[in-house]
Image (cartoon, grey):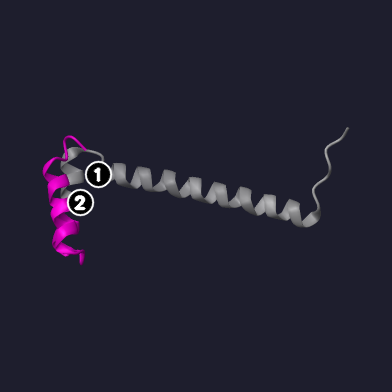
Amino acid sequence: MHAAEPTPSAAESLLLLAVQRLTLGTLFVWVFFENLGKDLYTPGGYASLIRHYVETGTAPAAWKAVMRFMAERAAVA
């Protein structure tokens, strides 16, 4: 038995899905190396980023307290 050939609309959907996967994969790799260049994967870089969010963000005070707690323990996170 032979596998059924995909219909034109199904083939187009598969192509669009493949393009979307490649685009998202490229985005994740891009952001990883951008963050690596900013030194955000070190405890100090991570803590600095979280402190920036606490100082400039508009999150509720309870959430900012959680972020401060995590920034203080950046070496563990």
**Residue at 56% across, 48% down:** 21
- Residue range of the region highlighted in magenta in the rendering: 49-77
Q: Which residue is mark 1?
A: 40
The reply, left or right, for residue 13 in relation to residue 45 is: right
Figure quadrant of the C terminus = top left
Q: Which residue is mark 2?
A: 49
Residue 40 picture quarter: top left
Q: Nearer the viewer, residue 41 or 65?
A: 65
Residue 2 picture quarter: top right
**Residue at 62% across, 51% down:** 17
Question: Mark 2: which secondary structure?
Answer: helix
Q: Nearer the viewer, residue 35 or 15?
A: 15
Query: In the rendered structure, are the residues bearing label 1 and label 2 in contact, judged by CB atoms less than 8 Å apart?
Result: yes
**Residue at 36% across, 43% down:** 33
Vertical comparison of 9 with 31: above or below: below
Vertical comparison of 57 with 71: above or below: below
